[in-house]
Amino acid sequence: MSRGPRRAGAGQGAAAAVQLLVTLSFLPSVVEAQVTGVLDDCLCDIDSIDNFNTFKIFPKIKKLQERDYFRYYKVNLKRPCPFWAEDGHCSIKDCHVEPCPEYSKVANSTKELEDCEQANKLGAINSTLSNQSKEAFIDWARYDDSQDHFCELDDERSPAAQYVDLLLNPERYTGYKGSSAWRVWNSIYEENCFKPRSVYRPLNPLAPSRGESFYTWLEGLCLEKRVFYKLISGLHASINLHLCANYLLEETWGKPSWGPNMKEFKRRFDPVETKGEGPRRLKNLYFLYLIELRALSKVAPYFERSIVDLYTGNVEEDADTKTLLLNIFQDTRSFPMHFDEKSMFAGDKKGAKSLKEEFRLHFKNISRIMDCVGCDKCRLWGKLQTQGLGTALKILFSEKEIQKLPENSPSKGFQLTRQEIVALLNAFGRLSTSIRELQNFKVLLQHSRCHCEKGQLFPSTSASPSAGSWGTADSPALGSLQPEVPAEPLAVHHSTQTASVGSRK
C-alpha cells in the first residue's frame, strides 16, 4: 500500500478526532445549563435531588437490591402480545422465540446478520435455577398464599411465571432495536398519553413538521394528564440511560466489555442532536424519581407494622432486610421537597373519580404493551419497571386506606403482594441508578473537555469517550454502579448456586 493514501486517511481521522473533542468540550456546559433548576409542576430543584440521591438513597437502595427478597422477581415472559403479532428485530432462541431466519433467505448484508446474532446472544435470559432455590420459592409461595390478597395476581399465579434473578440479568444494551422497539414506544406515546392524533410529539419520524405545537398542547392539559406524559417520558429516559451506561464496548476472546458509551449518550440526550428534547427527557426522569420517592414515603406505615415481614425463610436476614428497608423509608420521609399528590384529582368528586379511572386504565394498557417487546431481557425490565410505577401510583391513590391500616391484622382496604413490593423497590432502584449514572456522564464529559483544553488531541485510554474504567472516590466509575452478585444468592437454608431468568436492554 502506498504511503500517500495512508497519510490522507490519518489526516481525516485526526480531523474527525478534533471535531469530536470540540463537540465534547462544548457539551458539558450545555447539558449542565439545561438540566438544572426547579422542575415544572413541583417545587423541587435538580441539585437537591442529586445530593439527596447520592448521599442518602443510592448506597442503601443498591444494598437492598442485593438481598434475597428483592433480587428474585416472579414474572411471566411468555404472554403473547395482545395488540399485534410479534415481529422483533431479532428473536432470541434461549427464550423460546422464533429463531433468526436463515441468512440466505433474509439477511441482505453481513451487518444485518451480525446484528441479529448479537441480539440473539445479548438478549438471552440466564435461566439457571439451583434446586435449593426452587425449593425456597415453593416455601415462599406457601407463605404468600397464607396471606390475604385483595388485588389481581394473574402474573404470579400463571403456570408460565418464573422467578428471575435480577442480579444475574442486569439491565443493559442487548441490540434490540429497529421497527419492533420503535413500534412499542410509538404505541405507548401515540395511543396512551391522552394525545390526539393531530398533535405530533417532537422527533416523531411520521410528523409532517418538527412538532413545535406539542408543548403548547401539553401545557394546555390538566395537571394529571401532564403528569402522565412526564412519567412515561421519564421512564423512557431512565431506560435509555441504562443502555448508554452499560453498553457493549467490545468483545475479546468471548468476554464482553461493558461500560458507558459517550456517543450513544450524546445521540439520545445532547440538546443539539435531539433538537432540545434531551434535557426535557432528563428533567422528566427527575420528575418520575420524585413521584416514586413520594410513594415510598407514603407507604412506610404499611411496612412498619409488626405483621409485615419480608419472608425468605432466613429469620436473621429477613429481619436485617426489613431494618434496611425501614431505614430507607425514614430517609424518604426526610426529603423536604416532595411532590404534592393532593394537587391531582382535586376537582369535583365525580369528575376526579372519572379522570382517575381513565388514568389507571391508560397505565394498565401500557403494562400490557410490555408483552409486545420482542427481546425477553427488555421485556423483563419493562414489565418490572411499569409494575413498580403502577404500584407507586396505587400507593399515592390509596392514602386513606393506608392511614386506616390495622397494626396486627391484614388490611382488606390496602394490600401489596410480594411481586409488587419487589417491583416497587427495584424500579426505584433503577431510577436512583439512572440519576447516579447521569452524574457520572457529566464527569466523563467534563474530563473530555479538560483534555481538549490542554491541547491533547488523542486522550489516553482511561479518558476515552467510551471508557468506563476510571472514577474518583467522590464520583465512582459507572462500572461500579451495578450491584455485585453475592456468592450465595439464597441464604435461606441452601448452598451456593444462583438463580435467574431475565434482564433488560
Image: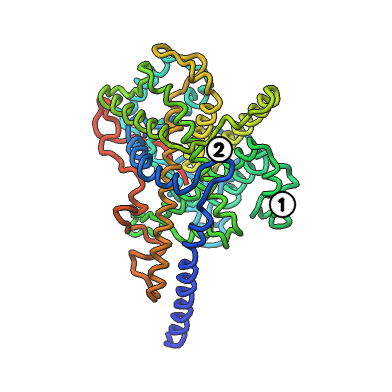
Is residue 431 visible to the viewer in this orientation of the structure?
yes
Is residue 236 visible to the viewer in this orientation of the structure?
no
Q: Closer to the camera, 197 or 410? A: 410
**Which numbered disc flags the more N-terminal residue, 2 or 1?**
1
* Amino acid found under the numbered disc labelled 2: Met
The spot of residue 31 in percent (x, y) is 50, 58
> In which image quadrant can residue 433 be found?
top left
Q: Residue at x 45, y 31 (%)?
A: 296
What label does residue 117 carry, if any?
none
Task: Name the image quarter holding the N terminus.
Answer: bottom left
Q: Is residue 298 above or below residue 256?
A: above
* Amino acid found under the numbered disc labelled 1: Ser
Mark 2 Cα-neighbour bin, 10 Å: few <14, some 14–19, many ≥20:
many
- SS under mark 2: helix
The spot of residue 28 in percent (x, y) is 47, 62
What label does residue 213 carry, if any?
1
The spot of residue 221 in percent (x, y) is 69, 40
Q: Which residue is mark 2?
A: 370
Q: Is residue 322 above or below residue 123?
A: above
